[in-house]
Amino acid sequence: MQVLVIVLNDLSYQQKVLEIFIENNVRGATILDSEGMAKAVLENEGLGMLLGGPFAKSIPTNPASSKTLFTVISDDSIIPKLLEQLKNTLEGSDKRTVGFMFTLPVSGIYPLTSKTKKELK
C-alpha cells in the first residue's frame, strides 16, 4: 500500500489526472490548493512585485496556482502502470514546470469516526 502525491502546476491537466485515476480503479483522492515556496517567500518579504517585474522569466508562470493531489493505493501492482500513464500524459504540457509526483509506503489506514456515530449504530 502506498500514497501517491502529485503537485500539479499545470492545472489544465487536473481532469486528465483524475480520469487516469478512474481508469486504474483509484476511486478516491484529496485535492488541495497549494502554493510554491518561491511565491510565498517573495510575498512574505514584500517582494511580490518581482513576480511581474524583471525577474518574471526566472519564476514559473503563476507560481501560486497549483494543486496537490494525494491518494492511497492499496494494490502496489498497479503503481508502475499508473505512474507511466501519468508521466506520459503530463509530458504533453507546454509549461516549463508541470509539477512532480512521488510515492511513500503506507503501513496502515485508521478511519476516524465520532462517538456520536458509534452510539447510533
Image (tube, rainbow, N blue to C red):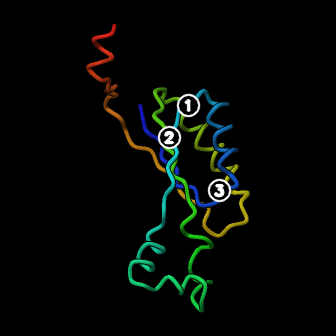
Q: Judging from the image, what secondary structure is the residue with disc 2 in?
A: strand
Quadrant including the N terminus: top left
Q: CA distance from mark 2 to mark 3?
A: 15 Å
Residue plotted at (37% across, 38% down): 105
The residue pinned by badge 1 equals 78
Q: Is residue 30 above or below residue 59?
A: above
Q: Is residue 63 above or below residue 29?
A: below
Q: Position of residue 100 (x, y in %)?
A: 53, 57
Residue plotted at (43% across, 72% down): 40
Residue plotted at (42% across, 36% down): 2
Q: Judging from the image, what secondary structure is the residue with disc 1 in?
A: helix
Quadrant including the C terminus: top left
In the displayed structure image, the side of residue 78 where residue 16 appears, left or right: right
The residue pinned by badge 3 equals 11
Q: Position of residue 98 (x, y in %)?
A: 62, 61
First-in-chain label (1 vs 3) = 3
Q: Is residue 11 above or below residue 69?
A: below
Q: Could you say which quadrant of the image residue 52 lies in?
A: bottom right
Q: CA distance from mark 1 to mark 2?
A: 19 Å
What is the residue that sits farthest to the bottom in this orientation? 54
Q: Judging from the image, what secondary structure is the residue with disc 3 in?
A: helix
Bin the neighbour count of mark 3 within 10 Å (Cα to Cα): few under 14, some 14-19, many 20 and up: some
Residue 97 or residue 121, whichever sits in front:
121
Single out the mark in the foreground, 1 or 3. 3
Type of residue at label 1? Answer: Ile
Type of residue at label 2? Answer: Thr
The residue pinned by badge 2 equals 30
